[in-house]
Image (cartoon, rainbow, N blue to C red):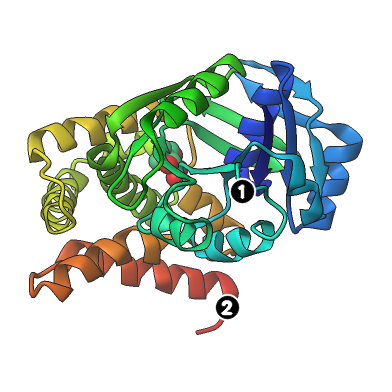
């Protein structure tokens, strides 16, 4: 199976590195020429558990290289999902499945619009990695990746299972479940807690466990997230979600969240697609969303600070 990884960020480099190390046929497609050059000349370097290893996935800026892919893994930021999909869609074969485990709400819907609901595979990942250079990442946690059926896709379950099995064979431990939607929304709530709080405080994920004042904020975010999920058609238990949030913080203790990494680089964050999206779901149903709205505005202000555009 030839795999096309779209995006050379922390997750794209990690997935492509692991697949290549396990002998998989993988190509990274990125728009950033300097990243493509670094990966093509020096490979990708993954640091984990106190040591590091190198792998040699192919890397290109040329979307025509997408043509032989059997599976396309979209690993761009959620605000780039549609542009990435439109860039590769003319070149992908009609048989190629397109999978997303990105952060944020509505990636699946955007991909389904471009590729059709029969070709899109939805899921989430708890892999935690920090981009440390153009071609290197620190792999902080080897978390689960889970794929499954989703209300916006019609991809047959057997095909989803095949994809999960292939990825697992190629070193990316992936499970397939009947209905991944509740867990996708749970992961969204996990991101709605970890990402803005670490970005605002400028701390690694694990510090959130030590700041007592945050436990109230976390409770509020979980309650809002659970209510938004129910409006989106998934009933979640607040207790279960809260446990998953704390488990994720503990597991990714050493990681810098993707939002903190974006703020530190002066880049746009995914806040509008995480807390902003939850806030919009609640408010458009006439429900208050104070915690998500406040954190969205604070992170947007931080982004502006990074761009020095007060
Ligand atoms: O966005 C992130 O940083 C990741 O999704 C996670 C799992 C919260 C780890 O930092």
Percent across and percent down for residue 251 are: 37, 25
Percent across and percent down for residue 158 are: 41, 26
**Is 258 placed above or below 254 here?**
below
The residue shown at (41%, 71%) is: 300
Percent across and percent down for residue 250 are: 33, 27
The residue shown at (44%, 51%) is: 202
Q: Does label 1 or label 2 sit earlier along the sequence?
A: 1
Q: Do we see residue 223 in this rendering?
A: yes
Mark 2 lies on a secondary structure that is loop
Percent across and percent down for residue 197 are: 33, 52
Q: Which mark is residue 308?
A: 2
Residue placed most toward the observer, 97 or 100: 97
Q: Marks 1 and 2, Cα distance to the nearest angstrom?
A: 45 Å
Q: Residue furthest right?
A: 41
Q: Do we see residue 134 in this rendering?
A: no
Q: Which mark is residue 51?
A: none
Label 2 within 8 A of ligand 1 by Cβ: no
Query: From the viewer's perspective, is 158 left or right of 3?
Result: left
Q: Are marks 1 and 2 in contact (CB under 8 Å)?
A: no
Query: From the viewer's perspective, is 24 left or right of 270?
Result: right
The residue shown at (62%, 19%) is: 170
Residue placed most toward the observer, 78 or 111: 111
- Quarter of the image for the N terminus: give it: top right
Query: From the viewer's perspective, is 111 left or right of 136?
Result: left
Query: From the viewer's perspective, is 225 left or right of 132?
Result: left
**Is 227 placed above or below 82 here?**
above
Residue placed most toward the observer, 224 or 201: 224
The residue shown at (38%, 62%) is: 273
- List the residue tagged with mark 1: 94
């Amino acid at each position: 199976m030839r795999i096309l990884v779209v995006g050379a960020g922390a997750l794209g480099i990690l997935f492509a590195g692991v697949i290549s190390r396990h002998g998989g046929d993988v190509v990274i497609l990125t728009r950033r020429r300097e990243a493509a050059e670094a990966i093509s000349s020096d490979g990708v370097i993954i640091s984990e558990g106190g040591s590091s290893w190198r792998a040699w996935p192919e890397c290109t800026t040329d979307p025509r290289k997408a043509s032989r892919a059997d599976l396309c893994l979209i690993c761009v930021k959620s605000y780039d999902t549609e542009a990435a999909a439109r860039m590769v869609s003319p070149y992908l074969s009609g048989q190629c499945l397109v999978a997303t485990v990105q952060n944020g709400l509505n990636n699946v819907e955007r991909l389904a619009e471009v590729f059709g609901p029969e070709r899109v595979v939805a899921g989430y990942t708890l892999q935690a990695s920090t981009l440390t250079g153009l071609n290197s990442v620190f792999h902080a946690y080897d978390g689960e990746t889970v794929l499954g059926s989703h209300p916006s896709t019609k991809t047959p379950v057997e095909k989803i299972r095949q994809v999960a099995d292939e990825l697992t064979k190629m070193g990316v431990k992936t499970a397939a479940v009947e209905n991944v939607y509740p867990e996708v929304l749970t992961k969204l709530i996990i991101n709605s807690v970890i990402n803005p709080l670490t970005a605002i405080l400028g701390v690694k994920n694990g510090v959130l466990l030590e700041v007592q004042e945050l436990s109230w904020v976390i409770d509020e975010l979980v309650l809002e997230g659970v209510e938004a999920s129910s409006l989106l058609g998934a009933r979640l238990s607040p207790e279960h979600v809260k446990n998953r949030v704390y488990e994720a913080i503990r597991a990714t203790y050493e990681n810098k969240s993707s939002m903190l990494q974006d703020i530190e680089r002066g880049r746009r964050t995914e806040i509008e697609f995480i807390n902003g999206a939850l806030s919009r779901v609640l408010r458009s149903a006439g429900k208050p969303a104070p915690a998500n709205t406040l954190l969205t505005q604070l992170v947007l202000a931080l982004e502006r600070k990074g761009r020095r555009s007060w």
